[in-house]
Amino acid sequence: MPRMTKLLLQLQAAADRRHGHGSGLGFVPGAGRRHPPTPRHASAAGRFAPSCLVLCLLALAAAATTLALALALTLHRHVPDPAAAAPGASPRGFAVVINTWRRYALLRRSVAHYAACPGVDAVHVVWSEPRPPPEHLRRAVLNGTRRGIVRFDINGIDSLNNRFRPIRGLAADAVFSVDDDLIVPCSTLRFAFDVWRSAPSAMVGFVPRMHWLADPRGGGTKEYRYGSWWSVWWTGTYSMVLSKASFFHRQYLDLYTNQMLPSIRKYVNENRNCEDIAMSFLVANATGAPPIWVQGRIFEIGSSGISSLKGHGLQRSRCLNTFAAMYGHMPLVATTVKAVDSRKSWFW
Amino acid sequence: MPRMTKLLLQLQAAADRRHGHGSGLGFVPGAGRRHPPTPRHASAAGRFAPSCLVLCLLALAAAATTLALALALTLHRHVPDPAAAAPGASPRGFAVVINTWRRYALLRRSVAHYAACPGVDAVHVVWSEPRPPPEHLRRAVLNGTRRGIVRFDINGIDSLNNRFRPIRGLAADAVFSVDDDLIVPCSTLRFAFDVWRSAPSAMVGFVPRMHWLADPRGGGTKEYRYGSWWSVWWTGTYSMVLSKASFFHRQYLDLYTNQMLPSIRKYVNENRNCEDIAMSFLVANATGAPPIWVQGRIFEIGSSGISSLKGHGLQRSRCLNTFAAMYGHMPLVATTVKAVDSRKSWFW
């Protein structure tokens, strides 16, 4: 029986039964310098001034040509709009779910940004304080946004599990889960949504992480270590994308809250960590497939988070091993796939 | 109602009810030169030999350093094997469906190649000649391959629709559809399969094409033009990946053969063209989503095909317009997403 079909049948069955704190900050990858410096072989130089001159002139000519060509291409390539090219296709939008915790200034900036992005048809603020949001904050947050687009989802208890509580009345299937201190530019967000549309059962996001075997040669027991951004950069390999900046199907909210092992939610609640790893386990276990890492620059507007605390790596590794024990196996699947915008990538 | 869920329910319902000629050759994109020549600003040169010397020396040093660094990274980055990193995840394999027509030498090379790729658990040869394959060919094709892995699927009638006939007894959900004159290296094939695993409802392939509005400013009627590889390269935008080198879910074979408008199959049969466009329409219409273009070098081992014939572009445009009229709308969805191997891409 196809696993994918089975999953979506489960999702379907759950369809009619239908919010936290940042998961950590870490190093945020962005589009960065797109082209690495190409190694060039310079001739021996020094006493060969005439040939050096010829070489330099040739280099100058080549550089000028390349620059002119690159400029011409840049000026022209961004003209066609895919949406305009395929007017029959008007994809539905998505909801942005912002997880916030006592950082009101960040929240105001964040909501103002996402509410103004094309394609966003709802912004949900996951509120996890004993008191409801103060009126001045509520007014400041709603100020200037489209009527009815922003909503506070109130939780009396502070729990990281809140960010994955099912949301009633969502118009679309896609949810973009994000921390209050992360700004993803609208065009980058839209691109990630395009990726998700083709891969609606996957988690699609900007912050990849990896799990590694502590001893790859293996003994009887398998112990896992959490791989940070640098390990992903070095190896090109990842098995999670963090929910602090990722798209997933809204029905995973129901699976997380109502179907996942309660012991996992309890662990997340008690340890105030790893709800993102729990969601990655859930999706990988349901699909048997890896997530998708989307290339794109994202911006941190805050400066503190649990990932900057001492012992963060150890805690995350502990989560990996605890959850794997609870599942009875390691569901995470590693991959090396990166989704890039072909308009920004010249060679194929 | 989530469209994706609906689609997979339909696929599920069709699950228990359970083979052409090359679609065209065109320009085959490959990984090519990965890094474009960086424009460099050379100084005025000529009479400034000493400064030229200094510049050349600096360039030499920079090049040596970069080369050393690149080599060091290259030597190290390919060590970790994602499959080894996540031993709990042993993804199932996939079937390769080779469409062939009277090119026996190509077929032998093609089968020998794909049958030896890791992850391939079946190779199906779509045979579309009045006579069954001659015994010498059958023996030559099966020679050296794993026992039982290769099978001829016999069709007495020559029709492009044969390549999409449902195949009984497939062990896995993924089908890699390929022409007999196209060789995708095993590692590239495996990478595309990784992409498909995360996006099992999408077509995932190496040959992107686009549809364009003949007059974007629009009149009352919409006329579409077929966009070749060059238009994709120029704009970074595509809406189809051709079935001559793409992965898709096996259940689309059933949808194509048993559910799609019979008038489309009839058109494909009579015009001996556009079965790939028909499949692209089918998948886009079912999912409401675009396909996924995978970056990777693929190789043509033949030199003739219908895409090299005069009037190919016109014929393809005619198919687009005919199919859109049959559907009552244009289901194709444009995108700019390209899946690249993050092990081969240094900057994020």
Image (tube, coloured by chain):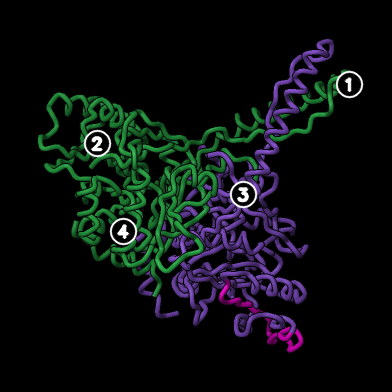
Chain colours: A purple, B green
- Disc 3 from disc 4: Cα separation: 31 Å
Q: Residues within 10 Å of mark 4 (few under 14, many from 20)?
A: many
Which residue in the structure is indicated by mark 4?
A: B323
Verify whether residue A135 appears in magenta. Answer: yes
**Residue type (three-letter) at the residue carrying disc 3:** His
- Disc 4 from disc 1: Cα separation: 65 Å
Q: Residues within 10 Å of mark 1 (few under 14, many from 20)?
A: few
Q: Residues within 10 Å of mark 3 (few under 14, many from 20)?
A: few
Q: Residue A318 in the image: x percent, y percent?
A: 60, 56
- Disc 2 from disc 3: Cα separation: 40 Å
Which residue in the structure is indicated by mark 3?
A: A76
Residue B100 marker: 2
**Residue type (three-letter) at the residue carrying disc 4:** Phe
Residue at the image point whose x is 37% and y is 36% from the top: B118
Q: Residue B6 in the image: x percent, y percent?
A: 34, 69
**Residue type (three-letter) at the residue carrying disc 1:** Phe
